């Protein structure tokens, strides 16, 4: 199963991807996580990417396409993958199509998680993330409190607020999403791949909806 999770920043793509890994044993490929790791390591790519990320803008297509090309060739992707945060532009989607043709693979589902914009701002500005990149568990200061304040329930590592989870950057990320990423819904609808779901309700409810879609076979993009 090759899956794309589509949705605005804070729609729950990362949270759902982590649960899907556990259920389907397929890797999550998050370009955001890969870029943050490069920033942390202080690589040349990381230094350049940070400027875009801090401004709520997209890192240039050629950079993220290069990352994805390398990642999809890895052996752990042969039995399937969950793309989280890629593609984010139509040229990225077109490049992905070309990479997949080369690998003899195809996308099976594009799950589009729909959440109201103001709810996304509330979610992101209150979000806290585990510092341990291998864990990356997410919490919220109002909705998903950790058992011990500031500490990840899953691995015991300190939680932090991502540099781009402040309100100014969040609003810029939403504008970027509406302009550059939302057109992907049309791109994949034409291919009959979009499975829209309402991203409201509990994490488990949304997860069960996604699992229902993935295990029930193909649905029309109108949801029937
Ligand atoms: P995310 O963790 O998916 O919210 O991504 C955080 C930031 O990384 C975004 O706001 C972008 O600056 C950058 N980024 C992640 N994925 C992509 C992508 N596919 N294309 C361009 N920039 C990206």
Image (tube, rainbow, N blue to C red):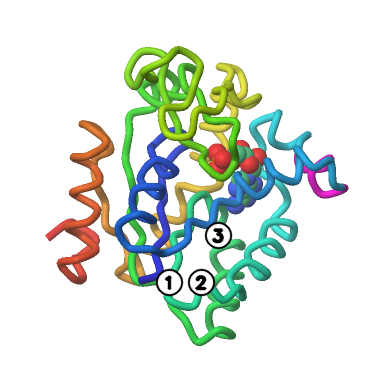
Q: How many marks?
A: 3
Looking at the image, residue 25 lies above or below residue 22: below
Tell me the quadrant of the picture where the N terminus can be found: bottom left
For the residues labelled 2 and 3, the Cα–Cα distance comes to 23 Å
**Boundaries of the magenta span:** 44-49
Query: Is most of the magenta stretch helix, strand or loop?
Result: helix
* Foreground of the two, 42 or 49: 42
Looking at the image, residue 129 lies above or below residue 93: above
Q: Which element is circle 3 on?
A: helix
Q: Which residue of the protein is positioned furthest toward the right in this rendering?
A: 44
> In the image, 136: left or right of 79?
right
For the residues labelled 2 and 1, the Cα–Cα distance comes to 5 Å
Looking at the image, residue 211 lies above or below residue 197: below
Tell me the quadrant of the picture where the C terminus can be found: bottom left
Q: Residue at x 38, y 38 (%)?
A: 12
For mark 1, what is the residue? 80
For the residues labelled 3 and 1, the Cα–Cα distance comes to 22 Å
Q: Earlier in the sequence, mark 3 or mark 1?
A: 1
Q: Look at the numbered discs 3 and 1 and tell me whether their residues touch, using CB distance below 8 Å.
A: no
Q: Which element is circle 1 on?
A: loop
Ligand 1 lies in quarter: top right
Residue 72 position within the rendered picture, expressed as x and y whole percent measured from the top left? 58, 71
Q: Which residue of the protein is positioned furthest toward the left in this rendering?
A: 224
Q: Which element is circle 2 on?
A: helix
Which numbered disc covers residue 77?
2
Residue 124 position within the rendered picture, expressed as x and y whole percent measured from the top left? 47, 24
> In the image, 8: left or right of 168?
left
Q: Residues within 10 Å of mark 2 (few under 14, many from 20)?
A: some
For mark 3, what is the residue? 90
* Foreground of the two, 25 or 58: 25
Magenta region includes residue 45: yes
């Amino acid at each position: 199963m090759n899956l794309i999770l589509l949705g605005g920043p804070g729609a729950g793509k990362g949270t759902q991807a982590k649960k899907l890994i556990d259920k389907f044993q397929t890797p999550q490929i998050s370009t955001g996580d890969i870029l943050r790791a490069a920033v942390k390591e202080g690589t040349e790519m990381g230094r350049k990417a940070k400027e875009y990320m801090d401004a709520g803008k997209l890192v240039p297509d050629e950079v993220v396409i290069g990352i994805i090309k390398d990642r999809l060739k890895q052996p752990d992707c042969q039995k399937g993958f969950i793309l989280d945060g890629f593609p984010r532009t139509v040229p990225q989607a077109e490049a992905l199509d070309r990479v997949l043709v080369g690998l003899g693979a195809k996308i099976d589902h594009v799950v589009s998680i729909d959440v109201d914009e103001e709810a996304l701002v509330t979610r992101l500005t209150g979000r806290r993330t585990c510092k341990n990149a291998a864990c990356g568990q997410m919490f919220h200061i109002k909705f998903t409190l950790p058992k011990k304040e500031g500490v990840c329930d899953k691995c015991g590592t300190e939680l932090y607020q991502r540099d781009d989870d402040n309100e100014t950057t969040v609003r810029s990320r939403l504008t970027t999403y509406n302009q550059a990423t939302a057109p992907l819904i049309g791109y994949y609808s034409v291919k009959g791949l979009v499975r829209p779901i309402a991203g409201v309700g509990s994490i488990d409810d949304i997860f069960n909806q996604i699992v229902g879609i993935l295990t029930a076979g193909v649905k029309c993009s109108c949801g029937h």
